[in-house]
């Protein structure tokens, strides 16, 4: 028997287990959702929607004002990278004076494009009904929730910076904030069509993966941003930041798919996610198109 035949036989035996079926479903659902395209769309929408609002929010921070400082705090960047950002992004502008009240309003309204893109990801993943346009306030609430979460994480990191214990507490608080955010956002966008218990599991998975990504980013991102700033100036920072947003969006999309697959699993993990009163499914219909 050749290597190929042995591999196929091994895979067939794995597929007969609940773990094998779960892995197969996750792979198929990721491919069906076109996860990389969805993540790139989310990253682009975040850059054109969320970042302008963070720029406005950075001008009114009571401590360490400036967008560069806000980015450094929210990502946990090194002092060297913080200096590169400070040198490339102005820090002495005021929100109303440099941007204008009308521009702030336009940025706030246009930021809902990120929410709509995120809603499409959730709709296709969970296969639930689309909400009425009359509840469009949910899009704005989503944007504000994301911005507030980023500001809260930036505040805790700037406040608790120092020794290892402070950094550990800041990381735990960041996971808690992300869990709360990614439970609230799909619950609101999908209008409570998915059980909260399942959303909490998916949100916790997202938060933990974002924590791991941030740990890896604390090593990679300073190098990428410093190299980009040195070679291409502010444009290099933009390239590095968009790449980082893509990585974050990829985590959000992929963990949503994984959370749905786990909730529908016929194994022990499915029973844990659904709870003792849960049935054989998650309470949602099979994933469908947009």
Image (spheres, grey):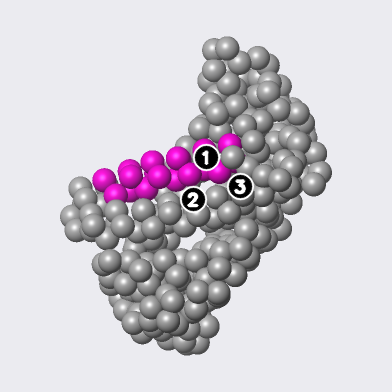
Number of the front mark, 1 or 3: 3
Determine the residue located farthest toward the right in the rendered image: 289
Query: Which residue is at a point 55% across and 43% down the rendered structure image?
Result: 185
As helix, strand or loop, the secondary structure at mark 2 comes to helix
The first of marks 1 and 2 along the sequence is: 2
Residue ID for mark 3: 138
Q: Which secondary structure class fits the magenta region best?
A: helix
Residue ID for mark 2: 145
Q: Are marks 2 and 3 in contact (CB under 8 Å)?
A: no
Query: Which residue is at a point 61% across and 19% down the rendered structure image?
Result: 267
Asked whether, in this view, residue 97 is left or right of residue 29, the answer is left
Bin the neighbour count of mark 3 within 10 Å (Cα to Cα): few under 14, some 14-19, many 20 and up. many
The answer to whether any part of residue 77 appears in the image is no
Asked whether, in this view, residue 20 is left or right of residue 157, the answer is right
Q: Is residue 264 magenta?
A: no
Q: Disc 2 and disc 3: Cα gap in Å?
A: 10 Å
96, above or below 50, in the image:
below
Determine the residue located farthest toward the left in the rendered image: 163
């Amino acid at each position: 028997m050749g290597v190929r035949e042995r591999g196929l036989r091994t895979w067939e035996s794995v597929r007969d287990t609940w773990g094998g079926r779960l892995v197969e479903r996750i792979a198929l659902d990721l491919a069906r959702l076109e996860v990389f395209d969805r993540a790139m769309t989310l990253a682009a929408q975040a850059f054109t929607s969320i970042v302008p609002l963070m720029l406005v929010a950075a001008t009114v921070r009571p401590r360490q004002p400036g967008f560069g400082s806000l980015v450094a705090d929210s990502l946990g960047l090194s002092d060297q990278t913080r200096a590169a950002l400070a040198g490339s992004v102005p820090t002495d502008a005021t929100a109303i004076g440099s941007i204008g009240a009308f521009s702030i309003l336009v940025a706030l309204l246009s930021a809902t494009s990120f929410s709509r893109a995120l809603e499409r990801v959730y709709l296709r993943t969970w296969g639930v009904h689309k909400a009425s346009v009359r509840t469009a306030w949910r899009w704005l609430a989503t944007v504000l929730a994301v911005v507030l979460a980023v500001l809260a994480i930036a505040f805790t990191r700037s406040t608790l910076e120092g020794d290892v214990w402070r950094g550990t507490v800041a990381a735990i608080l960041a996971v808690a904030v992300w869990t709360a955010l990614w439970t609230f956002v799909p619950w609101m966008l999908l209008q409570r069509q998915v059980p909260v218990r399942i959303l909490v599991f998916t949100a916790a998975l997202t938060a933990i993966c974002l924590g791991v990504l941030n740990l890896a980013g604390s090593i990679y991102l300073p190098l990428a941003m410093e190299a980009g700033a040195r070679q291409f100036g502010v444009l290099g920072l933009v390239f590095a930041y968009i790449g980082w947003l893509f990585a974050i969006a990829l985590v959000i999309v992929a963990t949503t798919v994984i959370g749905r697959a786990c909730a529908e699993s016929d194994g022990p993990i499915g029973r844990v996610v659904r709870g003792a009163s849960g049935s054989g499914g998650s309470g949602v219909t099979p994933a469908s198109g947009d």
